[in-house]
Image (cartoon, helix red, strand yellow):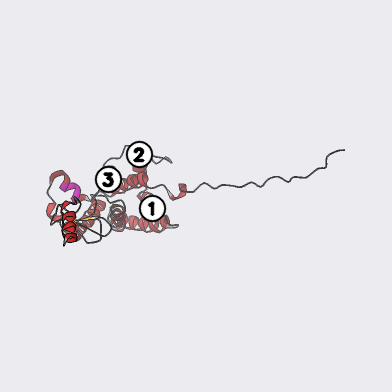
Amino acid sequence: MADEKQHRHEEESSPLLNETKPFSPHLGWTADGFPTGPGSVIGQPMPTARAPWSSSLCSCLGQTDHFCSSDLEVCLVGSVAPCVLYGGNAERLGSVPGTFVNHCLPYSGLYLIGNSCFGWNCLAPWFSYPSRTAIRHKFNLEGSCEALDRSCGCCGSFLKDDAQREQCESACDLATHVFCHTCALCQEGRELRRRLPHPGFNAQPVLVMIPPTEQTMGRGGA
C-alpha cells in the first residue's frame, strides 16, 4: 500500500508527465516528421509555394550569363531562328543526346507549313507549348493563373482544386505560345540558362595521371 502511494506521488510530481501539449484538430504529423494540414495527403510533405519566373514575358534585355548567353542573344535567336532557340531549350531541359535535332526539325517543319499555308506560325506553338509546362513542373514555377491571382486576386476559384488548376495552367501555356510565341520561347530560354548549364559545357574535369620517367640505378664509383 505504501509503495502504491509513493508511485502515485511520483507521477503527480513529474513535470514531464504533467506537461500538456497543444492540440489542433487541423494539424497532424506524419511518420517522417512532416506536418499535415487540411487537404494534404498523409505521409507526404505539404507542398511549398510556387516561385515566380526569374524574368517577365517581355523582359528581352537584362542579365548576362556565362558562355555568351545574354538576354539580348536569346532575344535575337528567338526572333530570327525560333527553331534553334526551342531546340536549345529542349536540349537543356532534357540533357539527352539527340534532343536538339528531335525537337528542332519537327518544329521547323511545322513552322514552314504554318507560314506557307496560313501566313503565320500557327502550328509550331501546339508542338512547343508542353516545354513550358515541363519547365513549370521541374522548377516549381507559378503559372499564368497563379500570377494573375497574386496580382489582382481574380482567379482564386480555379486554384482550389489541383486538377482544375493544372488544366487551367496548361491551357494558359498553350495560349501564351499561340499569341506570344516568340516572347514565351525567350522567357523559357532565359529561365533555363539561369538554372541549367548547357550539356556541352557540363563536362567534369579529368585528372590525368602522368607516369614517372624511367629511372636507372647506377653504381657508385670506387
Tell which of 33 and 65 is nearer to you: 33
State the extent of the magenta-drawn residues as a range: 145-149
Tell which of 168 and 215 is nearer to you: 215
- Predominant secondary structure in magenta? helix
Q: Label 1 near label 2: C-beta < 8 Å?
A: no
- Give neighbour class at mark 3: few <14, some 14-19, many 20+ (Cα, 10 Å): some
Residue 52 horizontal/vertical position (percent): 25, 45
| Lateral position of residue 119 relative to residue 96, left or right | left
- Measured Cα–Cα span from mark 2 to mark 1: 18 Å
Residue bearing the label numbered 3: 53
Inspect the image, locate mark 2, and give the three-letter code of the amino acid beneath it.
Leu
148 within the magenta span: yes
| Lateral position of residue 23 relative to residue 94, left or right | left
Q: Is residue 83 above or below residue 62?
A: below
Mark positioned earlier in the residue sequence (1 or 3): 3
Q: Label 3 near label 2: C-beta < 8 Å?
A: no
Closer to viewer: mark 2 or mark 3 = 3
Residue 70 horizontal/vertical position (percent): 37, 39
Q: Secondary structure at mark 1?
A: helix
26 within the magenta span: no
